[in-house]
Image: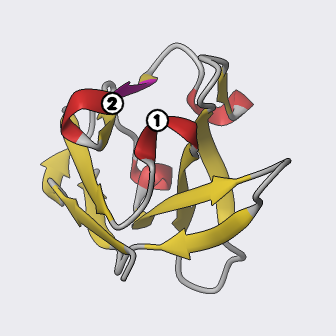
Amino acid sequence: QVQLVESGGGLVQTGGSLRLSCIASGIMFSRYTMSWYRQAPGKQRELVALFTGDGIRTLADSVKGRFTISRDNGKNSTYLQMNSLKPEDTAVYYCNAILTGAGANGPYWGQGTQVTVSS
């Protein structure tokens, strides 16, 4: 059974920082592309950052220079370090795992963690 469990969300003031964590189980973690998505009220879910199993990292333009994605394959975990937070970063943040190519599997989603940035 695949599980993704996020943590680290909360309420922070503008300019503050948060670090989100996602622990995966039930998958061969190192092979999966791990991503963070977010969904604000009334908006579509959008990709924030991804980190492939091959080591390629991508960030949405809106968070470049402020957010960093990382992963620790030994801990089956991925992280999203969020600095210089803005009110427009307020959303539910979801962890996502997908395996593409041979043996494709997923996507799998976590339950989400709320991030609220006050102005």
Q: Earlier in the sequence, mark 2 or mark 1?
A: 1
Which residues are drawn in magenta? 68-72
Residues at marks 2 and 1 touching, judged by CB atoms closer than 8 Å: yes
Q: What amino acid type should be assigned to the residue bearing mark 1?
A: Ser
Left or right, 24 with reference to 64: left
Where does the image place residue 90, in percent across and percent down from the top left? 40, 60
The residue carrying mark 1 is 30
Where does the image place residue 75, in percent across and percent down from the top left? 19, 37
* Quarter of the N terminus within the rendering: bottom left
What residue occupies the far front of the structure in this picture? 103
Q: Residue at x 44, y 65 (%)?
A: 94
Q: What amino acid type should be assigned to the residue bearing mark 2?
A: Asn
When asked about the image quadrant of residue 71, the answer is top left
Q: Main secondary structure of the magenta part?
A: strand
The numbered dot on residue 73 is 2
Where does the image place residue 55, in percent across and percent down from the top left? 59, 17
